[in-house]
Image: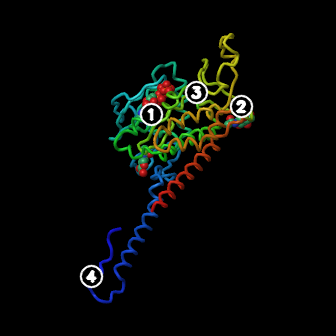
Amino acid sequence: METRPQEGRKGPPRRDVPPVVGLLLSMALMNALLYLCLDWLFILPPRSVGEPRHCPHGHFRMGQMSNCSPWLSCEQLRTEVRQMKRVGEGAVKRVFLSEWKERKVALSRLTRLEMKDDFLHGLRMLKSLQSKHVVTLLGFCEDDSTILTEYHPLGSLSNLEEALSLPRYQSINTWQHRLQLALDYVGIINFLHNSPLGTLVMCDSSDLPKTLSQYLLTANFSIVLNDLDALPLVNHSSGALVKCGHRELRGDFVAPEQLWPYGEDMPFQDDLMPVYDEKIDIWKIPDVSSFLLGHVEGSDMVRFHLFDIHKACKSQTPAERPTAQNILDTYQNVLNLLRDTATSQTREML
Ligand SMILES: Nc1ncnc2c1ncn2[C@@H]1O[C@H](COP(=O)(O)OP(=O)(O)OP(=O)(O)O)[C@@H](O)[C@H]1O
Ligand SMILES: *[C@@H]1O[C@H](CO)[C@@H](O)[C@H](O)[C@H]1NC(C)=O
Ligand SMILES: *[C@@H]1O[C@H](CO)[C@@H](O)[C@H](O)[C@H]1NC(C)=O
């Protein structure tokens, strides 16, 4: 500090507060303010405005809409929605950026008639699972095989690195925001495993790119589940387990119980392939989280703190893997711990 109280200063001979005290007081005040602001600096901006935005079943609200609207009917989809350019395509749906009442929306059309069952399963799930974890349904028409959903300009979660390199998002390319994305992701798995319909397994996830393409990145930098075409139900009390597809799966990304167990000598046969449960989703969490954490300052420190829980996710025995809720709690604890550490370290520098 250079500014020293000036001794030969002109002014009233007897001031109540000598200049040196005033200076000290204002410094203390500034410090206190900074101290308080630190809490804000390290807390992520509020992203979901929470539950008051919830609409009754069969209704939706998006963006700045103040009221809930009923899902659009076939008639409305045919006359009020203007299809613009194609933004994505998968095995089941072709997706078009479209316009409805001057809002951007996503219109999905069935690609091939053979996929109609998957399409209808996805639509049924989309209707039943509307929540903050799932893309908002705006309308559908079974006769035309169309579904209208909220449009998310950042597209699928595979685009994460591109999105984070955009000027307007560079400032949030931090371990805090990236760990928050991992929390969103595990939150979605936890929601599926404890859904109103029962324990649902995220089957469309045979490799990392495929898994990422099932989710959308919102402009608020949260994750929503978009593709619900392959969510079979596990029922532990009735012993009903599942299989993801009818083809042989290979590689390290899928859980070991998803691999053909009878060796190379015996050719794969779908009816001999054993069934499994939702713990296949748990096996995949470390790989998805690691992608989400990326390589920024601090992400290795986060990885270090997640080491034990991730190791448990990779247990060969499905029943020994933690639940999605266990993982969610651990992630939240690590986020709180590291945030507090970062805050107190900065405080010490003051
Ligand atoms: N609401 C949306 N907003 C922005 N982009 C979207 C939206 N819905 C879908 N997309 C884009 O279209 C792609 C394909 O959509 P979707 O996954 O629903 O198709 P699919 O045929 O069911 O795919 P799959 O082959 O995985 O079953 C997505 O990965 C995403 O890039
Ligand atoms: C993003 O958050 C704002 C408020 O912070 C909200 O109005 C808006 O609907 C949110 N958008 C999405 C896509 O969730
Ligand atoms: C699971 O199975 C039990 C016993 O058959 C049944 O009572 C229950 O309703 C099933 N749960 C779901 C979610 O299907």
Q: Residues within 10 Å of mark 2 (few under 14, many from 20)?
A: few
Residue 9 — which label?
Answer: 4
Q: What's the residue at 41%, 43% (across, down)?
A: 219
Q: Which residue is rendered at x = 66% and y = 11% of the image?
A: 267
Q: Give the vertical position of 76 relative to 349 (above or below).
A: above
Which is nearer the N-term, disc 2 or disc 4? 4
Q: Which residue is mark 3?
A: 253
Dot 2: what SS? Answer: loop
Q: Residue furthest bottom?
A: 14
Beta carbon at label 2 within 8 Å of ligand 3: no
> Residue 305 or 319: which is nearer the viewer?
305
Residue 128 lies, in percent from the top left, at: 56, 38
**Could you tell me the amino acid type at mark 2?**
Thr
Residue 148 seen in render:
no
Say if mark 2 contacts mark 4, CB within 8 Å.
Answer: no
Q: How many marks?
A: 4
Between marks 4 and 1 in the image, the one whose residue lies nearer the viewer: 4
Q: Nearer the viewer, residue 307 or 97?
A: 307
Residue hosting label 1:
156
Amino acid type of the residue that numbered disc 1 sits on in the rendered structure = Ser
The residue lying at 39 percent from left, 70 percent from top is 27
Residue at image x 60%, y 22%?
245
- What SS does tag 3 mark? loop
Looking at the image, is mark 3 or mark 1 earlier in the sequence? 1
Rendered view: 44 above or below 128: below
First of labels 2, 3 by sequence position: 3
Of the numbered discs 2 and 1, the one sitting upstream in the chain is 1
The relative height of residue 337 versus residue 123 in the rendered view (above or below) is below
Ligand 1 under 8 Å from disc 1 Cβ: yes
